[in-house]
Image (spheres, rainbow, N blue to C red):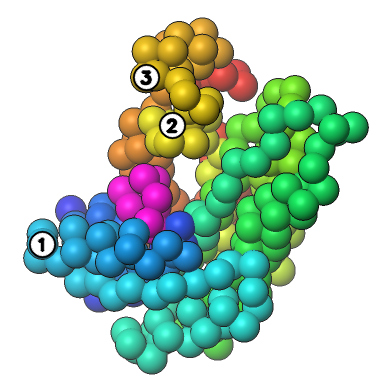
Amino acid sequence: MNRFTDKTVLVTGAGGVLGRTAALSFAQEGAAVAVADLNESAVHETVKMIESEGGKASGIIVDVTSSESVKAMVDTVVSRHGGLHIAFNNAGILGGGTPVGEHDEDVWNKVLAVNLTGVFLALKYETAQMAANGGGVIVNTASNLGAHWRLAGMSAYSTSKAGVSFLTRTAALEYINQGVRINSISPGPIDTPMSYLPGETREQRDARLAPTVPLGRVADPQEIANAVLWLASEESSYVVGHDHVIDGGATA
């Protein structure tokens, strides 16, 4: 399939497992991919992987908590590739693990800054660029641990991701008449480093998480990336302001 030929796609958090998987998938379907992350070496690695398969990519170092950095990211994408058609706002961190009364305030502030304010800033500059140039598509990464489920000790993460879900819905209503279609995904546990507790083995991780998922396993990152690409494609052209839950039935 070549659903994204002649399209420029921006992926934040593209140095991580899910972002990298999505970036590779977009490139395999013809897109020029702007690979953005705070981790410079991870950015270079993702770009190298795309180019080794014959794809088109460029790397951008970005701090999604900084308005100046996010604006510069979007400006750089446009100057390098001539436009911005699709954005996957995926940068995020975990944080937390303690009850609200014991939660470290610096951790709380950092989680919300990256996960929620980072998406807000991305939307701020992406929507302006897209609306002024004929429209586009945006997909944000929320979580089933946001507006759909709950887990003790995850107050900062869950709050940030619930915020992403509702921010997505509001922005979708604000920009659909300007040709910008916005949705989010809410994955359950994915086979990434974020799914592990400190010192935990794969077997221990699976034994802890599998019982929480009716499907009986954590998701392969490609399964989540497939949903992102569908939401970014014309196949989902009538989907607006939707939070697409992909969690193996955990919140069914």
**Which is nearer the eye, 79 or 52?**
52
Q: Is residue 15 magenta?
A: yes
Residue at figure coordinates x 70%, y 36% from the top left: 96
Q: Which amino acid does label 1 sit on?
A: Ser
Query: What is the C-alpha distance between the residues marked 1 and 3?
Result: 29 Å
Q: In this view, does 126 lie above or below 48?
A: below
- What residue range appears in magenta? 14-22
Q: What element carries label 3?
A: helix
**Nearer-the-camera pick, 53 or 207:** 207
Residue 237, visible in the rendered structure? no
Toward the front, the furthest residue is 199
Which of the two labelled residues, at mark 1 and mark 3, occupies the earlier sequence position? Answer: 1
**Which picture quadrant has residue 215?**
top left
Q: Which residue is drawn at 45% across and 9% down?
A: 207
Point out residue 122 in the picture as x, y percentages from the top left corner.
59, 70
Q: In this view, does 60 lie to the left or right of 127?
A: left
**In contact (CB < 8 Å): disc 3 and disc 2:** no
What residue did someone put label 1 on?
A: 52
Secondary element under disc 2, as helix, strand or loop, is: loop
Which is more N-terminal, label 2 or label 3? 2
The kind of residue tagged 3 is Arg
* Distance between mark 2 and mark 1 Cα atoms: 26 Å
| Residue located beneath label 3 in the image | 202
Of the image marks 2 and 1, the number of the one nearer the N terminus: 1
In the displayed structure image, the side of residue 100 where residue 3 appears, left or right: left
